[in-house]
């Protein structure tokens, strides 16, 4: 079939297997071009098929030579429907790892469930023995609690008052004002239940109880803080409250693991184009302005550059892991330099529909959005007949 992008708002409903594979290969080649990392040997990545989770898995395997297990909730192709981008990404990763002689396994299912946790534990015990790094990179709009059975849904809303600021339709470049009503108390509760730290804690507890978490193991989860421009809808909103819970969980886990020489961190990462960030009003316009300035400044990084730096300089670097006053790893340091943020703030005040393509990298934002799904990737013939059915090697 001829596979073309079909988008609805911030959702692309199709994905291209060859384009996704090319994107994964680019990340693999980047890591292989860098110095090797003296890092983990056996890695579990929960949320492994896209974004920072996928990049973490690539860095683990091709930077440190680690064996990996990736857990993700993606769908195979069915009839006229393509597979999800995460499915194609994972197939490409598994093939690259196999070609390199690195052990890798995939589990597809609901990471929030006890069933998938048990399946992961059995696989670790059978194939790896123990793991020494757990990356928690789950991004889901919903979660069903494995004990109570309640299903929670997250929302992206401010707290305490209505919020209005600029936003952009990245498909047509229209800059408008977005107004978002504040979350209710129950919406806040549910967002924390989905995006907070409870499930991360459950993973570590169950891995420890099963004896498959090695002494001295590290675990890391990912977060974002960002500038004042986005705080009302992000850091000071429902998502920020969930991230506060995630960070509090990291402190508890650090205390729990350090008795056996282990450690737990939250890494605060740079703003990047993801399907999740595309759904947050204001954020796509901020990222477009940020990208232009950081690219001109020579400091722009994508997922793979961020994760290679996290692993090689912070988690497994020559010095003790550097954290800020809250105990957070700050890989957003280049984004948050005063000079970069001052330049973004200046541009922000000027942005309109008429000048958005001149003052920001909106064209680059849109291209990266479609690249998430394997489109607009150099070297791919999008008019060619393509088989959407792709098998994932080592799928358990």
Image (cartoon, helix red, strand yellow):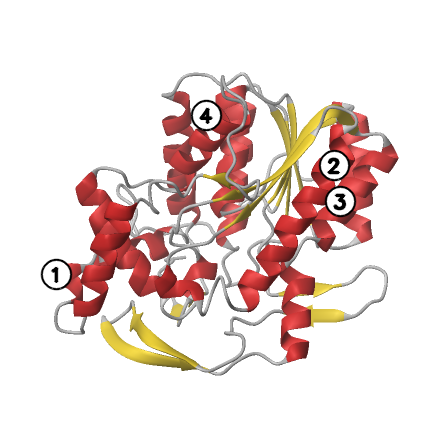
Nearer mark to the viewer, of 4 and 3:
4
In the figure, is residue 105 to the left or right of 239? Answer: right
Q: CA distance from mark 3 to mark 2?
A: 16 Å
Residue 255 image label: 2
Nearer mark to the viewer, of 3 and 2:
2
1 or 2: tag closer to the N-terminus: 2
Tell me the residue at 39%/64% (across/down). 230
Q: CA distance from mark 4 to mark 1?
A: 35 Å
Q: Which residue is mark 4?
A: 313
Tell me the residue at 45%/69% (across/down). 233
Q: Is residue 201 visible?
A: yes
Q: Is residue 3 above or below residue 259?
A: below
Nearer mark to the viewer, of 4 and 1:
4
In the figure, is residue 49 to the left or right of 350? Answer: right
Mark 1 near mark 2, Cβ–Cβ under 8 Å?
no
Q: CA distance from mark 4 to mark 3?
A: 26 Å
Near-viewer residue (106 or 364):
364
Q: CA distance from mark 1 to mark 2?
A: 49 Å
Q: Which residue is mark 3?
A: 203
Q: Which residue is mark 1?
A: 358
Q: Quadrant of residue 42?
A: top right
């Amino acid at each position: 079939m001829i596979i073309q992008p079909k988008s609805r708002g911030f959702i692309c409903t199709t994905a291209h297997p060859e384009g996704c594979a090319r994107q994964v290969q680019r990340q693999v080649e980047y890591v292989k071009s860098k110095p090797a990392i003296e890092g983990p040997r056996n890695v579990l990545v929960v949320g492994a098929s896209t974004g920072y989770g996928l990049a973490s898995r690539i860095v683990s395997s091709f930077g440190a030579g680690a064996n990996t297990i990736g857990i993700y909730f993606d769908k195979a192709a069915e009839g006229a429907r393509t597979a999800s981008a995460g499915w194609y990404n994972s197939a490409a990763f598994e093939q690259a790892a196999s070609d390199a002689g690195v052990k890798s396994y995939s589990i597809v299912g609901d990471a929030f469930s006890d069933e998938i946790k048990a399946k992961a534990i059995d696989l670790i015990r059978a194939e790896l023995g123990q793991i020494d790094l757990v990356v928690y990179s789950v991004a889901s709009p919903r979660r069903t609690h494995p004990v109570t059975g309640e299903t929670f849904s997250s929302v992206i809303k401010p707290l305490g008052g209505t919020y209005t600021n600029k936003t952009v339709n990245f498909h047509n470049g229209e800059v408008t004002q977005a107004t978002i009503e504040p979350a209710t108390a129950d919406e806040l509760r549910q967002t924390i239940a989905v995006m907070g730290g409870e499930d991360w804690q459950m993973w570590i507890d169950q891995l420890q109880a099963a004896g498959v978490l090695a002494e001295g193991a590290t675990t890391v989860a990912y977060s974002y803080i960002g500038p004042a421009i986005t705080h009302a809808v992000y850091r000071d909103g429902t998502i920020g409250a969930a991230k506060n819970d995630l960070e509090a969980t990291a402190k508890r886990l650090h205390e729990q693991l350090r008795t056996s020489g282990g450690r737990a961190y939250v890494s605060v990462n740079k703003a990047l184009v993801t399907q999740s960030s595309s759904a947050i009003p204001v954020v796509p316009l901020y990222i477009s302005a940020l990208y232009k300035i950081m690219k001109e400044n020579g400091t722009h990084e994508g997922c793979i550059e961020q994760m290679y730096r996290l692993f090689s300089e912070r988690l497994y670097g020559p010095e003790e892991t550097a954290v800020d006053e809250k105990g957070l790893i700050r890989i957003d340091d280049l984004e948050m330099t005063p000079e970069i943020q001052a330049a973004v703030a200046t541009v922000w005040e000027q942005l309109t529909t008429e000048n958005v393509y001149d003052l920001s990298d909106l064209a680059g934002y849109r291209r990266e959005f479609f690249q998430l799904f394997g489109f607009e990737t150099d070297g791919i013939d999008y008019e060619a007949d393509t088989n959407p059915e792709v098998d994932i090697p080592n799928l358990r």
